[in-house]
Amino acid sequence: MKVAFHNHAVVTIETNDGTKIIVDPFIKGNEKCDLDVDQLEIDVILLTHAHDDHFGDTIELAQRNEALVIANVEISAYLSQFNIETYGMQPGGSSTLDFGKISFTPAIHGSSLEIDGRPHTLGLACGIILEADGKTIYHMGDTALYSDMKLIGSRFDIDLAFIPIGDTYTMGIRDALQASKWIKAKKIVPIHYNTFPAIEQNPQEFTDHLEEAVGIIPNIGESIDF
């Protein structure tokens, strides 16, 4: 399995069977992202919620690649009008697909998309857990700290977690450190910081307070060893 972080909340995963997955493809308009929408080959798109800095280039990528989009039921219903194949889920649910098992966790956050100049709420924000190739990856999406993260940490043996630290709209560093203790991931990558002035943070301040060798700050596009 190959995993890479591409700034903000954008993560790519390639499973051993060759399935190419992207989480929250905010690429255009994201100056720090190293990906090119026009060149990207994707089989599956995972969406944590509908905000534009996560929904991003979903429609274009899905249509050009004939990719499957896995998202909450409301986002999936919205995308169906664009002749896009979708698989709708909700927090608490799990599904086993050809490439692995997907579980949606709660996330305390909004989920809306601007359509025709007006915001439209599209379901609940979620975190996403992927179990594939003997590994478990947890992408928290955008969320506040909540105590049921303890249950997620006891239910799943998490190898790699992507945790937001930007504050203002999500957990800041202090709450992200508490979340890290509760989910007990073997490796942790901070996400959702320094894309905009409102979420400027020093990721080293976060990783320095994790247990030794747990925190990773990868270069943009660099494969993550875990």
Image (tube, helix red, strand yellow):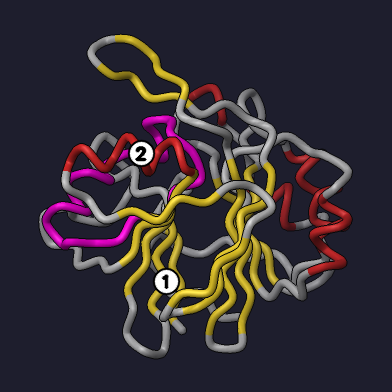
Q: Residue at x 45, y 24 (%)?
A: 112
Q: Quadrant of residue 11?
A: bottom left
Task: Inspect the image, locate mark 1, and give the three-letter code of the amino acid beneath it.
Answer: Ile
Counting labels gives: 2
Write the start and end of the magenta stretch as one range.
47-69
Q: In the rendered view of the protein, which quadrant contains the C terminus?
A: bottom right
Residue farthest along the top direction in this orientation = 118
Depth check: give the residue in front, 173 or 50: 50
Looking at the rendered structure, the secondary structure element under dot 2 is helix
Depth check: give the residue in front, 80 or 177: 80
Nearer-N-terminus badge (2/1): 1
Depth check: give the residue in front, 84 or 107: 84
* Picture coordinates of residue 5, whole percent (x, y): 45, 61
Looking at the rendered structure, the secondary structure element under dot 1 is strand
Q: Name the residue under label 2.
A: 77
Q: In this view, does 169 lie above or below 85?
A: above
On the picture, is 67 further left or further right than 5? left
Determine crowd level at label 2: few under 14, some 14-19, many 20+ residues with C-alpha closer than 10 A: some
Q: Quadrant of residue 66?
A: bottom left
* Picture coordinates of residue 75, whole percent (x, y): 40, 38
Q: Name the residue under label 1.
A: 13
Question: How far, Cα to Cα, is label 2 from label 1?
Answer: 25 Å
Q: In this view, does 92 lie above or below 226?
A: above
On the picture, is 40 further left or further right than 23? left
* Picture coordinates of residue 115, whole percent (x, y): 28, 19
On the picture, is 142 further left or further right than 224? right
